[in-house]
Image (tube, rainbow, N blue to C red):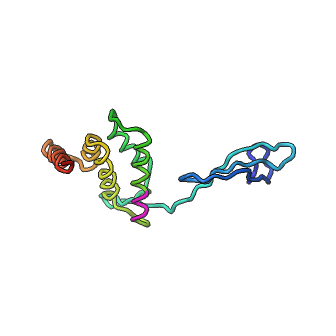
């Protein structure tokens, strides 16, 4: 590991800690004139997961795209950022565990809706209305009635 300050090619690890997603290492430059400290992170590189869209096209799975959709559904709802992040993490974990290389887009949407249903009914219906492309008020009403029946 090269020092980011002096580019010396030797550093030593002072401390290592594992987090949920990476290994955090505190390092120190071995150059006697520098000896500055810095932090590095090691993260496991996941094999790309392709999402098979409804029209048959494929694109790489994007956690950020899923996160944006769920944040949009949760706007002005009493749902914290940590809860949204853990929901997206859970969906991604389940999808990667269940599918190795390709996942149909509907499986991602269904998993996200299942998780939203348990957290907040309004956010669930908002997400479902976009995901399922409700065409009329009757479809919307059926989804709300289904949610009410599911809760009781």
Asked if residue 46 lies left or right of residue 73, the reply is right
Asked if residue 61 lies left or right of residue 46, the reply is left
In the image, which residues are magenta?
93-98
For the N terminus, give its image quadrant: bottom right
Residue 54 position, x and y percent, is 30, 58
Q: Residue furthest top?
A: 76
Residue 115 position, x and y percent, is 33, 50
Q: Residue furthest right?
A: 32
- Image height of 55 relative to 3, above or below: below
Residue 103 position, x and y percent, is 37, 62
Residue 23 appears in which quarter of the rendering? bottom right
Circle count: 0
- Residue for point 82% across, 50% down: 30
Which secondary structure class fits the magenta region best?
Answer: helix
Residue 108 appears in which quarter of the rendering? bottom left
Asked if residue 28 lies left or right of residue 32, the reply is left
Residue 71 position, x and y percent, is 37, 40
Is 129 magenta? The answer is: no
**Between 131 and 80, the one nearer to me in the picture:** 80
**Between 4 and 57, the one nearer to me in the picture:** 4
Is 94 magenta? The answer is: yes
Q: Residue furthest bottom?
A: 100
- Residue for point 26% across, 43% down: 121
**Between 139 and 115, the one nearer to me in the picture:** 115
- Residue for point 39% across, 60% down: 95
Residue 10 appears in which quarter of the rendering? bottom right
Asked if residue 2 lies left or right of residue 53, the reply is right
């Amino acid at each position: 590991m090269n020092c980011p300050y002096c580019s010396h090619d030797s550093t030593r690890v002072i401390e290592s800690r594992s987090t949920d997603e990476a290994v955090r290492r505190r390092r120190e430059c071995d150059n006697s004139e520098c000896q500055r400290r810095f932090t590095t992170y090691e993260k496991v590189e996941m094999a790309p997961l392709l999402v098979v869209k409804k029209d048959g096209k494929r694109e790489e799975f994007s956690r950020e795209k899923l996160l944006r959709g769920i944040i949009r559904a949760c706007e002005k709802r009493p749902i914290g950022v940590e809860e949204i992040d853990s929901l997206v993490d859970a969906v991604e974990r389940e999808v990667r565990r269940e599918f190795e290389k390709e996942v149909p887009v509907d499986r991602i949407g269904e998993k996200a809706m299942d998780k939203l249903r348990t957290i907040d009914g309004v956010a669930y219906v908002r997400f479902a209305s976009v995901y399922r492309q409700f065409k009329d008020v009757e479809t919307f009403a059926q989804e709300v009635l289904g949610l009410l029946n599911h809760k009781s």
